Amino acid sequence: MSICRIIETPATPEQYDQIRTRLGVDENNPPPGGKVHIAAKGDDGKVRIMEVWDSREQAEAWGEKVRAVREELGVGAGAEPTITYLEVLRFMSV
């Protein structure tokens, strides 16, 4: 079952880019199980992420790698992101 997760991060767009660079992920090298990744900047200047994954386990495994890099870079020290998981009912690319 595919899942969607919505993440309210403590990262700025610049920090978000640093994390992605460190992880070596981009459009040509997505994480295993990742189907869709959308990053947007909120009114507070922090990044919000919406993703679709093949499974929650894959999403959480990737999240652990992201967490390690965030800690290494000192991004959002003491502020854990809020993560909401939802079951995907329909997926449509337009």
Image (cartoon, grey):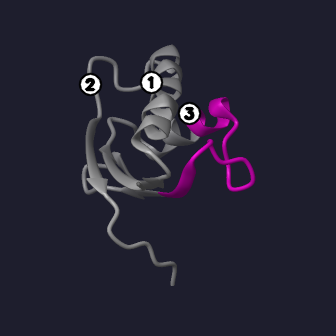
Residue 67: mark in rendering = 1
Say which residue label 2 marks: 79
Assign a secondary structure to mark 1: helix
Tell me how far mark 3 sits from mark 2, CA to CA. 16 Å
Front-most of 55 and 24?
Answer: 55
Using the image, determine if residue 90 lies above or below residue 38. Answer: below
Q: Residue at x 50, y 38 (%)?
A: 58
Mark 2 crowd level (few <14, some 14–19, many ≥20, 10 Å Cα)? few
Q: Say which amino acid is labelled 2.
A: Ala
Q: Position of residue 72 (x, y in %)?
A: 52, 15
Using the image, determine if residue 77 lies above or below residue 35. Answer: above
Q: Residue at x 38, y 53 (%)?
A: 3
Assign a secondary structure to mark 3: helix
Tell me the mark number nearer the camera, choosing from 2 and 1: 1
In which quadrant will I find the N terminus?
bottom left
Mark 1 crowd level (few <14, some 14–19, many ≥20, 10 Å Cα)? some
Q: Position of residue 59 (x, y in %)?
A: 45, 40
Q: Residue at x 32, y 68 (%)?
A: 89
Front-most of 12 and 3?
Answer: 3
User: Magenta residues, as a range?
Assistant: 18-37
Q: Residue furthest bottom?
A: 94
Say which residue label 3 marks: 19
* 32 left or right of 94 in image: right
Q: Residue at x 51, y 78 (%)?
A: 93
Q: If you read the primary sequence from the N terminus, does the residue marked by circle 3 or circle 1 appear first?
A: 3
- The answer to which quarter of the image holds residue 79 is top left
